[in-house]
Image (spheres, rainbow, N blue to C red):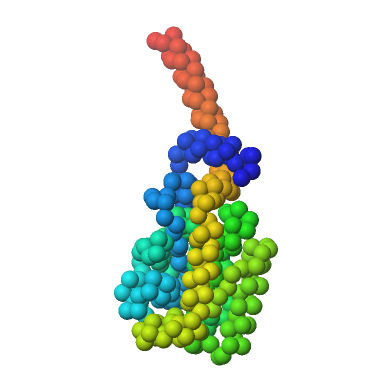
């Protein structure tokens, strides 16, 4: 955490106390960013580590989570071709609190819910449908938004990018190509660092789970994902609070310049209003003096 972080957070609180107008009119998205900062600044409800699963609508988030919690019937997290997850859903398994989020491209409220889950979680599963190729514009925009407000390297170190829908790909060659493309896109967004990218077949794992075929389950790569996920969770167990405070400070410092700009514009507008009011008061005073002179003349004539 930088030495300026506490000062930035304190300055942010002072400015927020003085602003009482429509922030979104002045800076679209600023009010939402402040709300997410408030959520992140609130201590977690419990000491259990949380894993948030995010991604576009219908990219396999719920199916993946059902795999990870061992639900062969897809009942824990709702699965359907139509939109099912409309708010964050939680389920605790093996000491880990899993959070399923709405699709990022479903609605603005759904995007907010997903980003809120990130702020309250410790490890992240970013699910992408491999059959569509690389990350699309919406996915890149969300990741760029995260990259701009998180300490450098923190998101990548906490995130596993999971490629799903492998049965719709044109063989292993396309899967490897998509892995390479996604990795290149992530380096472009986050600047440096190699991301953890793992292709998994949720349908293969579910088939192996139902039929009791261990080799089929292993071939799906879901057990490998589970091992990688547990490694990240265990690695964060001792540094959770320090990491959360670092993220609070980083987000506060990213919001502070925007608030200062809003305050500067507000002060300028206030100065202009006060100037117009002063000129009107002067004009009124001048008119009042002219009226008094005219009144005295009329009184003298009568």
Q: Residue at x 48, y 15 (%)?
A: 293
**Is 4 rendered above or below residue 184?**
above
Left or right of residue 85, residue 263 in this image: right
Q: Residue at x 64, y 63 (%)?
A: 190
Where is residue 242 shown, x and y percent of the image?
54, 47
- Residue at the outermost right position: 192
Left or right of residue 173, residue 75 in this image: left
Where is residue 176 shown, x and y percent of the image?
61, 83
- Residue at the outermost bottom position: 170
Where is residue 132 shown, x and y percent of the image?
53, 81
Rendered image quadrant of residue 116: bottom left
Where is residue 239 shown, x and y percent of the image?
54, 51
Of residue 225 and residue 135, the one placed in the foreground of this image is: 225
Of residue 122 and residue 250, the one placed in the foreground of this image is: 122
Q: Quadrant of the C terminus?
A: top left
**Is 34 rendered above or below residue 148?**
above
Rendered image quadrant of residue 185: bottom right
Q: Quadrant of the N terminus?
A: top right
**Is 41 rendered above or below residue 109?**
above
Rendered image quadrant of residue 106: bottom left
User: In this rendering, does residue 93 appear at all?
Assistant: yes
Of residue 42 and residue 114, the one placed in the foreground of this image is: 42
Q: Residue at x 64, y 78 (%)?
A: 180
User: In this rendering, does residue 263 appear at all?
Assistant: no
Q: Residue at x 64, y 39 (%)?
A: 3
**Is 277 rendered above or below residue 264?**
above
The number of callouts visible is 0
């Amino acid at each position: 955490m930088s030495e300026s972080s506490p000062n930035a957070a304190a300055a942010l609180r002072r400015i927020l106390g003085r602003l009482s107008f429509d922030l979104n009119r002045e800076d679209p998205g600023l009010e939402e960013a402040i709300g997410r900062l408030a959520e992140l600044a609130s201590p977690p409800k419990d000491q259990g580590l949380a894993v948030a699963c995010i991604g576009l609508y219908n990219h396999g988030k719920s199916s993946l989570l059902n795999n990870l919690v061992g639900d062969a019937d897809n009942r824990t997290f709702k699965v359907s071709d139509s939109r099912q997850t409309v708010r964050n859903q939680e389920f605790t398994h093996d000491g880990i609190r899993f959070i399923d989020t709405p699709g990022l491209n479903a609605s603005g409220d759904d995007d907010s819910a997903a980003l809120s889950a990130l702020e309250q979680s410790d490890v992240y599963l970013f699910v992408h449908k491999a059959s569509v190729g690389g990350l699309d514009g919406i996915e890149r925009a969300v990741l760029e938004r995260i990259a701009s407000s998180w300490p450098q390297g923190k998101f990548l170190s906490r995130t596993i990018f999971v490629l799903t829908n492998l049965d719709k790909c044109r063989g292993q060659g396309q899967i490897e190509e998509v892995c390479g493309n996604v990795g290149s896109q992530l380096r472009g967004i986050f600047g440096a660092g190699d991301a953890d990218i793992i292709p998994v077949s949720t349908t293969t794992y579910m088939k192996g789970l139902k039929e009791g075929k261990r080799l089929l389950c292993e071939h799906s790569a879901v057990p490998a994902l589970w091992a990688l996920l547990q490694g990240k969770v265990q690695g964060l167990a001792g540094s959770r609070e320090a990491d959360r405070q670092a993220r609070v400070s980083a987000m506060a410092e990213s919001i502070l310049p925007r608030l200062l700009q809003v305050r500067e514009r507000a002060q300028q507008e206030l100065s202009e209003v006060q100037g117009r009011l002063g000129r009107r008061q002067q004009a009124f005073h001048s008119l009042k003096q002219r009226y008094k002179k005219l009144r005295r003349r009329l009184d003298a004539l009568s």
